[in-house]
Image (tube, rainbow, N blue to C red):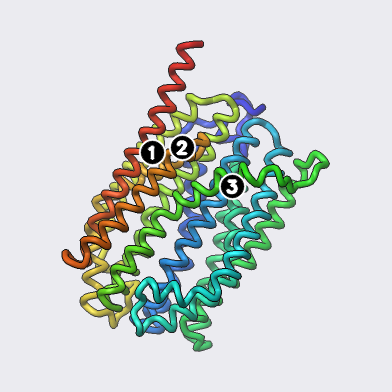
Amino acid sequence: MARASETSTSSERLLSEEPLAAIVGFAVPMALSSLLEQLYNMVDSIVAGNFLGETAVAAVGASFSLCNVLVYAAIGCGIGAGVLAARRYGEGSRAGAARVIWTSVALFSAVGLVLAVAGLPLADLVLEALGTPAEALADSVAYMAVYFFGLPALFSLNATSAMFNAVGDSRTPLALLAVSAFINVAGDVASTAFLGMGVAGIAVSTVAAEYVVAVLGALILWNRTRRWSDGKSMLDKSLVFPIERLAVPSVLQQSTIAIGLMLVQSVVNGFGASYLAGFSAAMRVENVATVPTIALGSALSSFASQNVGAGQDERADEGYRVSQRLVAVTAITIFAVYQLFCEQIIAAFLGSDATPAAMQVGVDYMRFVGWCYALIGLKNVADGMLRGLGDTRIFTWANIINLGLRVGLAHLLAPSLGVAVTWWVVPLGWFVNFAISHAGVVAWRKNLRQAANGA
């Protein structure tokens, strides 16, 4: 079994380094990886705005909300399964970790394939149900029709990246995402500026990048883990249920923001294409702004899971407290950037021909939500701690309540009070989510101390 006294290596630092250094050193590459993944959709919007016009931004934006749900579902699958892999790794069972890793990759690649087959004929129906403006609907459907073909690669890539993270390697996923982002950016510009493929070409670039890197990542992971084999099969059917038990709540937790945005966007859609373009631009920015604390939550999951597996519960608790302090630093930085540069950021997404209405919606959202990022940061690390402890029940309910509040109040109040309601309800959901999840961590901490006193 790995212990804190062992020599620190890139894969052992979560068990041995000082918690602040371990979590920051692990979270930074994860955050950069997520930023590169967000770059996919950011570049899609920027290229659409500058080469295809505001209607194309609205079309990609309408597609983005649905794509975002799928991306976060893929991330949640990987993170949930990664908790189990990290636990095996912390216990010192490399062969057990390898079986979790490859069972997870195979399982979630199959999930991506099923979703692709099921989603292709439903894309237009979903986009219509969300109230996508008529002038943007055709391009949105074209984008989604291509995007669904990439779901097996999307789920495989995120599962592979999460498995690297689970065993303490957050740098390899960063390198993979850097390659993928380069392919996507080059493809976006080529397909729109030179090949005239329109919005569908932007989706083709994203899908091609994902398939190339999914295969590359799987090959690297296989080379790493095949040395851990104990001679038994790398695929273990008995692990499917334990993986699903951790993955499903993580999918819900990761998807809460995306599902909420998709359903809230159905309210914004009713205000017209200009409002949708401005809101979509602000959502792109929000996705980037939440990356540092999502990475903190994910890093804390691996940190807590490995240390609990190694019998170092107090060290896991110290990691939670360190992560909360890091949230404060992150929130102050995001607030300053939002207040100082929101107009320039929104303008970069919308292009030079943006309407005043689109600009105003995007700027108003950013200025308001900038005050509230400490709440989503605290929510993410509390959820991450519970996930690392294997306690999925509490944060599952916390995220369900968060989603219900945001969507319910937006649909109820926006028709009478205006589009601004769709962002007034955001911090309320974040706060309630954090309060419930933090209460779960406090309960675990209390039981931990009672057990120590009893001993």
Which amino acid type is marked by label 3?
Glu
Q: Position of residue 230 (x, y in %)?
A: 80, 39
CA gap between label 3 and label 1 equals 21 Å
According to the picture, the residue beneath numbered tag 2 turns out to be: 386
**Residue at far right of view:** 231
- Marking on residue 130: none
- Marking on residue 437: 1
Q: In this view, does 187 lie to the left or right of 102?
A: left
Residue at the location (59% across, 47% down)?
244
Q: Is residue 224 left or right of residue 143?
A: right
Q: In which quarter of the image is residue 268?
A: bottom left
- Mark nearer the N terminus (3 vs 1): 3
Does residue 335 lie above or below 25 as drawn? below
Which amino acid type is marked by label 2?
Leu
Residue at the location (57% across, 24% down)?
311
Q: Can residue 95 be seen in this view?
A: yes
Which amino acid type is marked by label 1?
Ser
The reply to whether the C-beta atoms of the residues labelled 1 and 2 are less than 8 Å apart is yes
- Marking on residue 244: 3
- Name the element at disc 3: helix
